[in-house]
Amino acid sequence: MSIVEYKGLSKTGSLRSLTVKLKSHSGRNSQGRITVRHQGGGNKKLYRLVDFGVQKLDIPAKVETVEYDPYRTAFISRIVYRTGERSYILAADGVKPGESVLTSINAELKFGNRLMLKNVPVGYQVFNVEMTPGRGGKIARSAGSFVEVSAQDGKYTSLKMPSGEIRKVLSSGFATLGRASNIESNLEVSGKAGRSRWLGIRPTVRGSVMNPVDHPYGGGEGRTQRGTRRPKTLWGKITGGKKTRRKKKWSNKFIIERRKKKK
């Protein structure tokens, strides 16, 4: 077992006015049928109202706390603006309580500050990037993630994604400098099945140990081969190597270079 060290987090609890209780549906739709498998149970948790847009321009804010968020892998920061208003934002790696952050069209090039993409120099790392200006950050929000500004071209900025894909987004969108906090999250090893149950993840049974009636991989004596030429889901849909993106998707024109295939 290996877990993330939480020594650097603040000891205070979450702000009650910025938390809500979400109803757990355990992967079921409005008819009560399971549409997402392996969900259910888990510890009780409150949802923190995180401001992904951070649209309060030119109002300095001070970081009060850096907290754990049960609904995401990255840590969050509670900030207080000069006006006295408080908010939760995604915490940048290395930003500590007491430091100041600012959202401005042309803010200082400092980790945690949020500014327009057109004012970010080529080669800088950013996270919580807006795909559509004004709608809040959508790209690179998980723990330790970031995208790299690779070019500025008119009203578009080219970004290199973690997958290696290079795509264009509008330069008028905002992004936060640095990378998302909790960069060691990918090194975490559960160590036992119970820790997955605490997180609301139910067991996943391998298809190869099922009967032929239950899965395309099922049946056979002892450990056998897959039995089908291409990997399939429980319902026989091909998975491995099959492209799922629509050929005529409207945003294809913004992708300059597709991600590299794994060898």
Image (cartoon, grey):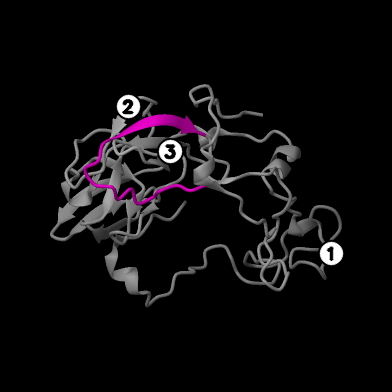
Amino acid type, label 1: Asn
Q: Nearer the viewer, residue 146 or 231?
A: 146
- Quarter of the image for residue 29 reads bottom right
Amino acid type, label 3: Gly
Residue highlighted by disc 2: 99
The extreme right residue here reads 221
Asked whether residue 34 is drawn in magenta, I would say no
Decide if residue 38 is on the left or right side of residue 240. right
Looking at the image, tell me whether mark 2 or mark 1 is earlier in sequence order: 2
The residue drawn where x is 71% and y is 61% is: 226
**Image quadrant for the N terminus?**
top right
Q: Nearer the viewer, residue 122 or 239?
A: 122
Q: Nearer the viewer, mark 1 or mark 3?
A: 3
Numbered label attached to residue 211? 1
Query: Residues in magenta?
Result: 48-67
Q: Nearer the viewer, residue 164 or 26?
A: 26
Mark 3 neighbour class, 10 Å CA radius: few under 14, some 14 to 19, many 20 or more: many
Q: Nearer the viewer, mark 2 or mark 1?
A: 2
Decide if residue 163 is on the left or right side of residue 212. left
Numbered label attached to residue 144? 3
Instruction: Please name the predominant secondary structure of the magenta segment in the image.
Output: loop
Looking at the image, tell me whether mark 3 or mark 2 is earlier in sequence order: 2
Amino acid type, label 2: Glu
Q: Nearer the viewer, mark 3 or mark 2?
A: 2
Q: Position of residue 30 (x, y in %)?
A: 67, 71
